[in-house]
Amino acid sequence: TQLLEQSPQFLSIQEGENLTVYCNSSSVFSSLQWYRQEPGEGPVLLVTVVTGGEVKKLKRLTFQFGDARKDSSLHITAAQPGDTGLYLCAGGFGNEKLTFGTGTRLTIIP
Amino acid sequence: GAVVSQHPSRVICKSGTSVKIECRSLDFQATTMFWYRQFPKQSLMLMATSNEGSKATYEQGVEKDKFLINHASLTLSTLTVTSAHPEDSSFYICSAGRTVSYEQYFGPGTRLTVT
């Protein structure tokens, strides 16, 4: 069974602070994606990373794929209340099926 | 692009009845669609992979006869929860995959409540 552990599970910080969410596995992924989900809605794709060591930026969000393609991180700079949500990483193994991480519930306090 | 819709968004049914949920890819063709279940405050759990024109592949522990999946066209997959019971109450989400990128695009989900 391929497991993706995310940490922290819950995170509550003040607006303007920085934060990092981690996604770790013992398996090597061919691709890794990050999604954000708001209550009562489906997940929305934020980014896909496929190359070990790859770094992608999306405004205040920075995503990194580990060199060994077993882990990833999401860093948010100057968090805003609109960043609140459930963040999910998901790993692919060269086919279309994804394995989702355990999730990180982020709350940004105004 | 890459818009996926689900219908209905919410459904309440009585125990013992069946409920059908539709998943459509609106602006692209999806040979593969996925059905997930999500419990409150938890991550997504893959139930089955739906392939156009062939039988669905179910994950371990998912009852095939209870969760019937049909993928009749490149833009439509349906999930039918048969003989629903209160423990089937959950948030069901579908996604459609784009083969080239292995990315999945999710529908808005269906909240099923069985009374």
Image (spheres, coloured by chain):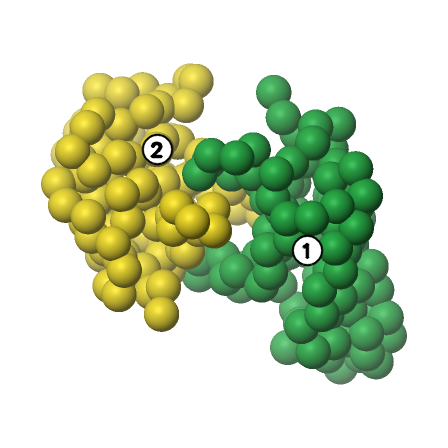
Q: Is residue B12 left or right of residue A80?
A: left
Q: Residues within 10 Å of mark 2 (few under 14, many from 20)?
A: many
Residue A8 on image: x %, y %: 79, 48
Which quadrant of the view contains residue A14? bottom right
Which residue is found at the position 33% from the left and 65% from the top?
Answer: B3
The answer to whether marks 2 and 1 sit on the same chain is: no
Q: Residue at x 75, y 46 (%)?
A: A52
Q: Which chain is yellow?
A: B
Percent x, y of residue B66: 24, 24
Residue B81 seen by the camera: no
Numbered badge on residue A50: none
- Residue wearing tag 1: A105
Residue B12 located left or right of residue A26:
left
Q: Is residue B69 above or below residue B105?
A: above
- Give the residue displayed 36% in from the left and 70% down from the top: B1
Quadrant placement of the C terminus of chain B:
top left
| Residue B49, numbered label | 2
Q: Chain of mark 1?
A: A
Q: Residue at x 61, y 20 (%)?
A: A1
Q: Position of residue B47 (x, y in %)?
A: 39, 31
Disc 2 marks a residue whose amino acid type is: Thr
Q: Say which colour chain A has.
A: green
Chain of the residue under label 2: B
Q: CA distance from mark 2 to mark 1?
A: 27 Å
Look at discs 2 and 1 and give the one toward the viewer: 2
Amino acid type indicated by mark 1: Arg
Query: From the viewer's perspective, is residue B59 above or below residue A23?
Result: above
Residue B109 horizontal side relative to residue A7, left or right: left
**Residue B36 vertical placement versus A64 (above, below):** above
Disc 2 secondary structure class: strand
